[in-house]
Image (tube, helix red, strand yellow):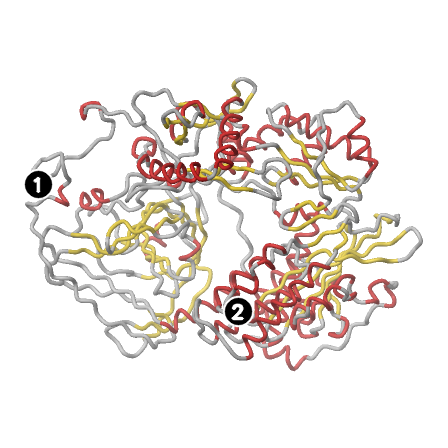
């Protein structure tokens, strides 16, 4: 257990009190520091303004016991060039816009990209002041690993706070109350820079990286991309003058921001991460070594000092294990299952008893999870790596999650449907195949009986391998595999491509056009991963011929002997008897009737219907619109709603069971048809209503008999923003989605020869085919993106009656959706010759002109 040791040998350093020099407490809790109470007076804020509200009030208040910390960070600012400067940033959710000081703009030689005229309300003035601001683009970089960054546009201003808001704060006061694992982003020293960046609500939540944690009564620690930040009140033992910076917010602002986020979260393309995967793998590869034919790497710490300051969590783990022991005494079968796993992992060298006489590390509580759906491992032991005591950090809080190196989930599904002969497999206990560096193993400890004998004392074990549940484990697994398979890129290029693009965590879903190629790919995958001491197994397929080849070959391929013909594929279910995809609705249907009619439950149920490919978008858009309606009505998360909206929700829930009958062909091209790869086309339809907008895509191909067939590929839908837009603008939003679908699918399907985009809005077609520069900014920006991702000539007109995307704007009952031919195959004329397609109609110029600048 925990071994006692002398204070002189303790590795945890305690700073003596600065007031009385005692080592028993720090100066914050010294009895000689007498408390005085006079809290700061909080001025009232205005709540009914509808324009930009951002103001700072400097006041000399009466001396008091508390200092109020605003959320600040020290960051690196970069312009268009390579020049970088350190600056201080203030997070302000009460400002609709972000600001940068003019002197910083000049120092970095930031170019003005446009000018904006704003009405500014301040506390001291009732009437707004009109100001014209220059807008600049800049990048904000973190000073902590993994050195993340965000790009913003900010308004240049001569002043932001008007004063040093922390001129009278003692930095030692801050450091004395910080958790050991904290990577505080602001040193709070008087000598560092004043506030030079104000990050407003337009970008604020892009910088947040986790939930706030309470560390004192009115003080919170908020993780961000730029490090940990403090916000709230801190005890101040000294009589100091307080500087009060006031930032005004309002309910009206919050409502406006909601509508803004709904539009811009969709319209802003995903930016590539600051560090490219190749850079990440290069840095990780320096830590990766091979020992005893197995890869080994350390835990991914936020900083090296984390090992020294992490709390051991022993008392929490001890109490949790005592509760587990009570369950063992009442349930012998639970102990038997537990013990079997422990013995197996000891024998495999995955875990072992600790041998250190003086323990320094972290102890994880654990519990059992039964997985009835698993064909191999029914019992899994889950370790709570987020457990912590008091204000100490958990192990997970001391580790970085790392970059997501797994392929796009939607891409894996898209490619899985592309192959005539599909197969799947997984890596056995993948996370447990990578060794942990010896110096980190004591940070993966847990309590269990010595020698797995319940009659012997409880002792400490540690993992020798990386385990599931640790923040960095997913990154470590993906990075190790990608580093390993690179060695085989030239020797086995097809197998490398498959493992690189279709291995999602530890599950492989892929296929080929022939039995021979499928066998070669699966065999190469097993061989490549075997060299990393990883076992790719449980192979399954729809092809009986491929199964026979697997079974009769001399390869190391292990087939899935316990298959029930229903295999989970990234949230879907693959029936490998009839080669169809569907949904696993049993968990949702089992307790559907127990849910109250609250907004929280509506969201919970909607989220349970995981549909990344948009197969049932016309059904799901109804619940999305219902959520929007609840939001507009101001219904609280746990407030029970009634009336017609309740009836609509209950009717929608009753329809879910019908989706059990939905069967979606996995293969785009029916296997009894020989297709002509030289004539595969992509057709994307877009549409909008005042409630929603979206797009749906189909592949059109020519058979060997000269006929044309179509297959559903993907759809995406969005609820219209609360801020009302005109119908043509919403139609343009639908066209944006269509253009992004085109761009994405062209990167997936290499055989696409032609692309056609369809809309029933002649106004939008006029915009897309015209010059973006002559339209208002909203239209111009979106037209530019569409013209960059698609050829304007490819856009054509179809009637609303024939537009399948119309279903995304009004919804459809689940029973009707299952058999709706137009949804699954597009309009009937799409399977005709091209000369029979709809002709272009005249444009309505008078409506187009309303958007001309």
Q: What element carries label 2?
A: helix
In this image, 418 relative to 167: left or right?
right
Which of the 4 image quarters holds residue 615? bottom right
Picture quarter with the C terminus = bottom right
Determine whether 113 is above or below 375 in the image. below
Q: Name the residue under label 2.
A: 627
Query: Percent position (x, y) of residue 47?
Result: 32, 75
Q: Which residue is drawn at 58% across and 41% down?
A: 406
Q: Residue furthest right?
A: 705
Marking on residue 576: none
Q: Mark 1 points at which residue?
A: 19
Q: Is residue 766 above or below residue 846?
A: above
Report whether 762 appears left or right of 381: right
Mark 2 neighbour class, 10 Å CA radius: few under 14, some 14 to 19, many 20 or more: many
Q: Quadrant of the N terminus?
A: top left
As helix, strand or loop, the secondary structure at mark 1 comes to loop
Q: Is 488 situated left or right of 82 in this image?
A: right
């Amino acid at each position: 257990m925990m071994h006692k040791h002398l204070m002189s040998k303790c590795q945890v350093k305690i700073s003596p009190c600065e007031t009385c020099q005692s080592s028993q407490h720090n100066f914050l809790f010294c009895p000689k520091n007498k408390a005085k109470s006079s809290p700061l007076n909080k001025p009232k804020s205005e709540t009914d303004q509808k324009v930009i509200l951002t103001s700072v009030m400097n006041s000399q208040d009466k001396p008091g016991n508390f200092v109020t910390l605003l959320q600040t960070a020290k960051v690196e600012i970069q312009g268009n060039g390579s020049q970088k400067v350190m600056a201080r940033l203030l997070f302000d959710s009460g400002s609709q816009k972000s600001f940068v000081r003019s002197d910083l703009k000049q120092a970095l030689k930031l170019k003005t990209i446009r000018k904006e005229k704003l009405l500014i309300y301040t506390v001291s003035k009732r009437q707004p002041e009109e100001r014209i601001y220059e807008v600049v683009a800049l990048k904000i970089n973190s000073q902590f690993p993994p050195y993340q960054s965000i790009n913003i546009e900010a308004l240049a201003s001569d002043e932001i706070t008007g004063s040093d808001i922390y001129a009278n704060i003692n930095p030692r006061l801050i450091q004395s109350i910080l958790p050991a694992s904290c990577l505080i982003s602001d040193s709070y020293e008087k000598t560092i820079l004043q506030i030079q960046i104000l990050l407003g609500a337009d970008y604020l939540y892009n910088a947040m990286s986790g939930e706030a944690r309470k560390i004192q009564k009115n003080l919170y620690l908020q993780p961000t991309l730029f490090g940990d930040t403090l916000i709230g009140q801190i005890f101040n033992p000294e009589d100091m003058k307080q500087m009060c910076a006031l930032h005004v917010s309002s309910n009206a602002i919050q409502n406006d921001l909601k509508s803004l986020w709904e539009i811009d979260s969709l319209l802003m393309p995903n930016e590539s991460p600051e560090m490219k995967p190749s850079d990440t793998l290069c840095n990780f590869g320096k830590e990766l070594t091979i020992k005893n034919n197995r890869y080994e790497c350390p835990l991914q710490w936020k900083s090296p000092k984390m090992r020294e300051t992490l709390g051991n969590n022993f008392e929490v783990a001890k109490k949790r294990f005592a509760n587990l022991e009570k369950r063992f005494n009442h349930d012998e079968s639970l102990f038997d299952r537990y013990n079997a796993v422990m013995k197996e992992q000891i024998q495999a060298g995955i875990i072992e008893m600790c041998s250190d006489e003086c323990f320094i590390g972290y102890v994880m509580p654990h519990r059992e999870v039964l997985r009835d759906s698993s064909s191999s491992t029914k019992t899994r032991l889950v370790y709570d790596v987020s457990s912590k005591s008091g204000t100490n950090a958990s192990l997970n809080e001391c580790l970085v999650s790392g970059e997501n190196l797994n392929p796009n989930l939607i891409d894996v599904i898209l490619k899985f449907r592309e192959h005539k002969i599909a197969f799947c497999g997984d890596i056995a206990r993948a996370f447990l195949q990578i060794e942990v560096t010896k110096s980190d193993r004591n940070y993966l400890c847990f309590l269990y009986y010595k020698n797995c004998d319940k009659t012997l004392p409880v002792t400490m074990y540690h993992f020798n391998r990386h385990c599931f549940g640790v923040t960095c484990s997913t990154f470590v697994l993906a990075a190790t595999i990608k580093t390993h398979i690179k060695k085989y890129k030239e020797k086995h290029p097809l197998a490398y491509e498959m493992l690189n693009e279709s291995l999602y965590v530890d599950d492989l879903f892929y296929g080929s056009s022939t039995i021979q190629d499928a066998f070669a790919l699966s065999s190469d995958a097993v061989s490549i991963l075997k060299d990393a001491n990883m076992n790719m197994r449980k192979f399954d397929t729809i092809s009986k011929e491929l199964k026979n080849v697997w079974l009769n070959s001399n390869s190391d391929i292990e087939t899935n002997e316990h298959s029930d013909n229903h295999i989970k594929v990234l949230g879907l279910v693959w029936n490998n008897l009839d080669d169809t995809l569907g949904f696993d609705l049993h968990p949702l249907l089992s307790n559907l009737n127990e849910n109250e009619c609250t907004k929280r439950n509506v969201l919970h149920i909607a989220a349970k219907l995981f549909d990344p490919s948009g197969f049932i978008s016309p059904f799901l858009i109804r619940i999305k619109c219902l959520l929007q309606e609840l939001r507009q009505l101001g219904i609280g998360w746990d407030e029970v709603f009634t009336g017609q909206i309740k009836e609509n929700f209950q009717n929608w829930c009753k329809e879910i069971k019908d989706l059990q009958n939905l069967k979606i062909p996995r293969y785009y091209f029916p296997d009894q048809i020989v297709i002509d790869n030289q004539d595969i086309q992509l057709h994307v339809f877009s549409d909008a209503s005042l409630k929603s907008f979206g797009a749906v895509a189909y592949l059109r191909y020519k058979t060997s008999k000269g006929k044309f067939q179509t297959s559903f590929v993907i759809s995406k839908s969005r609820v219209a923003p609360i801020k009302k837009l005109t119908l043509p603008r919403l139609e343009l939003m639908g066209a944006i989605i269509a253009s992004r679908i085109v761009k994405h699918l062209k990167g997936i399907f290499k055989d696409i020869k032609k692309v056609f985009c369809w809309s029933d809005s002649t106004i939008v077609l006029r915009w897309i085919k015209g010059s973006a520069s002559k339209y208002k900014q909203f239209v111009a920006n979106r037209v530019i993106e569409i013209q960059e991702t698609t050829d304007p000539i490819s856009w054509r007109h179809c009637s609303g009656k024939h537009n399948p995307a119309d279903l995304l704007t009004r919804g459809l009952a689940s029973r009707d959706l299952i058999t709706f031919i137009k949804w699954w195959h597009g309009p009937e004329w799409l399977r005709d010759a091209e000369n029979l397609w709809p002709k272009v109609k005249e444009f309505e110029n008078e409506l187009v002109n309303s958007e001309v600048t």
